[in-house]
Image: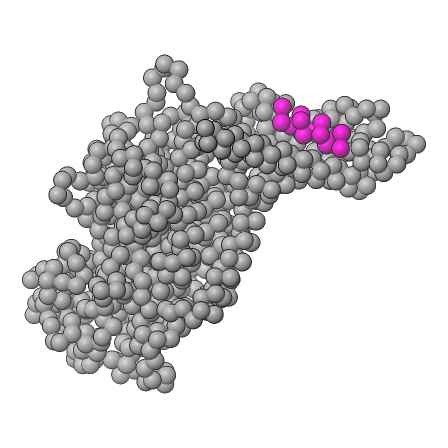
Amino acid sequence: MGDGRWGGAERWRSAGRALGRVVAVWAVSTLTMLILAALLPAFALQSAEGDTFTRTALTAAAAAGAFGLLGALVWPLIVRALLLVPALVLGLLVFFLNGSLLLVALWLVPDGRGTADPETAVVVAAVMSAVASATSTGLAVRDDDAYRRRLYRLTGRTRPRVSDGTPEQAPGTVFLQLDGVGLHVLRGAVADGLMPTVASWLEAGHRLTPWRTDWSSQTGASQLGILHGSNEDVPAFRWYEKDTGRVMVSNRPASAVELQRRAVRRTGDGGLLTVDGASRGNLFSGGADQLALVLSMAARRGRRNRSRAGYFAYFSDPANAVRTAGSLVAECFREIFQSTGALLRRETPRVSRGGTYPFVRAFATVVERDVVVAAVMGDMLAGRTAVYADLVAYDEVAHHSGPHGRDTDQVLRRLDRSVALIATVAEHAPRPYRIVLLSDHGQSPGETFEGAYGLTLKELVRAGCGLPVPRRVRRIRRGRPGAGSGGGSEARDAARDALRLALHRPVDETDETAKELPARPSEPIVLASGNLGLVSFPDVPHRMTREEIDRRHPALLRALAHHPGIGFVLVASEEHGSVVLARDGVEVPVAELDDGGPLAVFGPGAARAVRRTDGFPHVADIMVNSMYDPATGTVHAFEEQIGSHGGLGGEQSHPFLLSPPELSPPVGAGEELVGAEQVHRVLRRWLRECSGPQVPLEISPSTGGSESLLPVDRQVTQDKNR
């Protein structure tokens, strides 16, 4: 009884909100029509003798109402009738047909007071449609129901799919990557009621499976392995390659396309999404033909760059533009308010959140989210077989606000709303869909290395080499917010590059790479990837050994291995092949490495991860992993991040895989899911289960023809760092 009353009241409130929006749109449309009549000589709302303002306003209201009704009732029928018309022709016809509707609306006004030339009618109709659409959506910025209904109308679907007795198509699969959301964070969000959609899925029998990343626990390595089946020779988020003399950065377009090219060459297969697939908001294409906001496409020049097409398709609708612009402004103010509050409360640890960061955060958490979610909805309503999309919002905020707290709680709530929206739209798709949630890594909290010890990793390395360091390095300062150690967060860099691409601005490949190169070739290159540091000597063409480093810089390895902020160091050795060095003089050959000894604190699988990376051709001369405190779960990022990932230690190495019960278990009972490449094999198996044998059964051997599978038709633009 009570539930019925509540449901009835909710329906009345929903109807009241809808009626209020209709009245508001009608009023704005009337005002717009009055303004246009005053500005355009060939458009009139008065009789030849003239009318009072009240009579003119009534005429405008009648014409605006008639035009709105015709648009709501007649326009969908016109669009359906013209679905087979070529897109270019339809695009031109839209203006003339819309103008014709306005002429009909003016004809319906009593006493013939509304008149317009045909050419003017086209202009007036276009402005009226844009204003009405923008006003309607602007009033419903936070109303997902209204926004969802609009998407249904735009795709010609107004009711959920119903069974009519005919066999259904094979299920499609949507993979939604919640970037940076670790297993622990997801479980906490469900327990705290932040993600009710995910909670309902777990109650319905979805499987929550942990998996363990490789040593490089970051999006570049994980997503390359997941989408393309190989992340071999990706030692970190950024690294120096001696054979090419350049710095590779996973979220730089030239680097991304080169990494994808190498993976395709290595596997001989285009990727997870080669069969009727769509890639949305990712670093790599996965072999998909349908692409939007895919970074590896940004190295492609000219009009065929479909990475920009995602922005154009979304913002070509003014309603989308208003909705997203309103949320963008709100998010900027939210970040300013939150960062100011953290400053006033003197929260620690804390990093700088000023400058352009509020806008960068808003772009990552609003614009990219809206574009990607809308693209995924369109993919499902188009019936595509496989979709992989990355939602980066949590990762961006967690880097600067920390992985746990009020700031990230709000982001998790909005992510759950996006997941719920996608799940609801799936009910209207022409085929059933199985939605898989997964993450590429987690985030580990902790004060920056510089904040804890008063110097950056680069300054520590230079001091160990006997090179000049800033005078402030000699004064150890504890407990203050870090001022940064270079690099910046991967989500922030990706957001900035995506923004440049959206604005058709060229991406500067040298910003984050050239500045990392030393002034003299004999000096070390020090790069940071979260709490993983890489030290390379560019003047030595091969991987230097411990003995060579000791002869050149006798104090360097000792300074690194014995520093309290560093957990362990990996370096090649002429005597032992490679060794792991740690405090108290601990030295363990990699061949004898196990999950005990210096790696015990990092948990099971650490030895395997280190051993695998040690075999990469582009592993750095010195690999440095920060300390990890299991009691607090903290690490020390070598970048300006209080939530970080990239190395070993804590939550960053433990993402998740959430799959519906219709799919087979990811691994057998008692088995572990280890590494992004194994996740790729699981996802590939699920696609075969859903769509049949057209998905390649195995990753075929490398062939010369595999290069044609890459979405690049010109020579790749290389990173310029000399």
Q: Residue at x 25, y 52 (%)?
A: 654
Q: Position of residue 494 (x, y in %)?
A: 42, 55
Q: Residue at x 41, y 38 (%)?
A: 420
**Overall secondary structure of the magenta stretch?**
helix
Q: Is residue 520 visible?
A: no
Q: Position of residue 418 (x, y in %)?
A: 43, 42
Query: Compared to 471, does 585 lie above or below?
Result: above
Q: Residue at x 49, y 26 (%)?
A: 157
- Quadrant where the C terminus sits is bottom left
Query: Compared to 470, does 693 lie above or below?
Result: above
Q: Is residue 335 magenta?
A: no
Q: Is residue 216 left or right of residue 410?
A: left
- Where residue 509 sits, quadrant-wise, is bottom left
- Quadrant where the N terminus sits is top left
Q: Position of residue 411 (x, y in %)?
A: 42, 51
Q: How many marks?
A: 0
Is 574 or 213 nearer to us in this picture?
A: 213
Q: Is residue 112 visible?
A: yes
Magenta region: 61-73
